Image: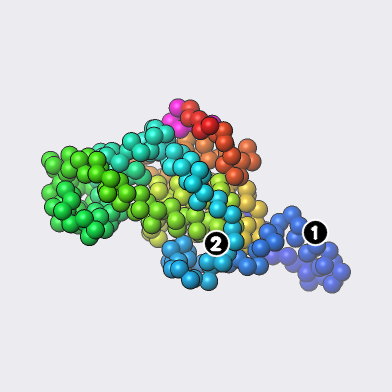
């Protein structure tokens, strides 16, 4: 929980100094003064900072932070963790051509992180891909994708869209496009904002997985709403809070949001994976790593 304001400072200067000296070593990151206090930050502002343009004032903080989840080996691990929850596999590269309607109200779910026809990100992916490769096999579906965006409808997509997606996913250019869109819309903003919040590798992954599952939007069910709710109950390390306490609160809030959904109520990606890493004190996601999702055990050497 957030600590109440330090009312003891109204006492004597000596007592105030003692309080500050007692609190500083345990609770405050030495670089916290450089970090942005996010407690009263709007969802819009948080998203803007996460997607900050090059040369933004937050760049110094991000540049000074360790690579964390952005290190190649950790990024590979992150995608394997996500794939275990999204597709029940560690071989995330086998999921470029994955596509099905899971019945969750988001239409077709497809690709390496579950782009959806009903949540705008699949449309954005195909639009950006078509701009670079106009002759692709998915371009003809763009009018239909625009019509069904925001719904679970298949109108204009059936019966050929799933086959076209699988065929296009055999092309290296489309595989690269899926990875580029993953990084642009999900991975890079999640890692950047986590670093600005003073979070290490595990915290960066927790943000990334939440953004994949709940979406990178500012709506009431999106990632930025979850973070906003967490900030009402706990301080980020950048604001002087304890990392484990803040992440514990964030996972609590995320778990509640998952339980509130009509489908996908299994929360094992939190309960027997991320929460376990946190309670084990594995803040750097050091391997070997063992976790469970949907009752199945996975290992990363």
Give how far across and how far down residue 216 sits, in percent: 39, 56
- Residue 105 lies left or right of residue 3; in this view the side is left
Residue density around tag 2, few if under 14, some if 14–19, many if 20 or more, within 10 Å: some
Give how far across and how far down residue 58 sits, in percent: 53, 67
Give how far across and how far down residue 107 sits, in percent: 25, 45
Instruction: Mark yes or no: residue 280 visible.
Output: yes
Residue at horizontal 17 percent and vertical 39 percent from the top:
163
Give how far across and how far down residue 48 sits, in percent: 44, 66
Please say whether residue 292 is one of the residues in the magenta stretch.
yes
Q: Could you tell me if the residues under marks 2 and 1 are in contact, i.e. CB atoms within 8 Å? A: no
- Residue 27 lies left or right of residue 247; in this view the side is right
Q: Earlier in the sequence, mark 2 or mark 1?
A: 1
Name the residue carrying label 1.
22
Residue at horizontal 45 percent and vertical 27 percent from the top:
296
- Residue 23 lies left or right of residue 268; in this view the side is right
**Most foreground residue, 11 or 247:** 247
Q: Is residue 35 above or below residue 178?
A: below
Disc nearest the viewer among 2 and 1: 2
User: Disc 2 to disc 1, how far (Cα)?
Assistant: 28 Å
Q: Is residue 212 above or below residue 297?
A: below
Q: Secondary structure at mark 1?
A: helix
**Most foreground residue, 262 or 187:** 187
Q: Which residues are magenta?
A: 290-296
Residue at horizontal 56 percent and vertical 67 percent from the top:
60
Name the residue carrying label 2.
62
Please say whether residue 26 is one of the residues in the magenta stretch.
no
Residue at horizontal 55 percent and vertical 34 percent from the top:
289
Q: Predominant secondary structure in magenta? A: strand
């Amino acid at each position: 929980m957030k600590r109440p304001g330090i009312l003891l400072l109204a006492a004597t200067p000596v007592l105030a100094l003692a309080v500050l000296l007692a609190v500083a070593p345990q609770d405050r990151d030495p670089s916290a003064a450089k970090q942005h206090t996010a407690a009263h930050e709007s969802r819009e502002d948080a998203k803007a900072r996460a997607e900050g343009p090059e040369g933004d004032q937050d760049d110094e903080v991000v540049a000074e932070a360790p690579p964390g989840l952005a290190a190649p080996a950790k990024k590979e691990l992150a995608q394997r963790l996500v794939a275990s929850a999204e597709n029940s596999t560690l071989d995330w590269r086998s999921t470029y051509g994955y596509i099905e309607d899971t019945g969750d109200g988001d239409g077709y779910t497809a690709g390496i992180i579950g782009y959806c026809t009903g949540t705008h990100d699949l449309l954005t992916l195909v639009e950006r891909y078509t701009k670079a490769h106009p002759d692709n096999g998915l371009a003809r579906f763009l009018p239909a994708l625009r019509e069904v965006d925001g719904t679970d409808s298949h109108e204009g997509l059936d019966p050929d869209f799933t086959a076209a997606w699988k065929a296009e996913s055999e092309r290296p250019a489309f595989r690269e496009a899926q990875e580029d869109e993953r990084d642009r819309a999900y991975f890079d903003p999640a890692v950047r904002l986590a670093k600005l919040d003073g979070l290490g590798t595990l915290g960066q992954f927790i943000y990334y997985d939440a953004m994949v599952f709940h979406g990178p939007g500012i709506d009431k069910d999106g990632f930025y709403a979850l973070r906003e709710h967490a900030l009402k109950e706990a301080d980020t390390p950048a604001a002087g809070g304890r990392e484990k306490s803040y992440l514990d609160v964030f996972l609590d809030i995320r778990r509640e949001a998952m339980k509130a959904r009509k489908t996908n109520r299994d929360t094992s990606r939190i309960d027997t994976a991320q929460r376990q890493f946190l309670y084990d004190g594995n803040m750097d996601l050091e391997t070997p790593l063992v976790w469970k999702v949907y009752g199945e055990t996975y290992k990363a050497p």
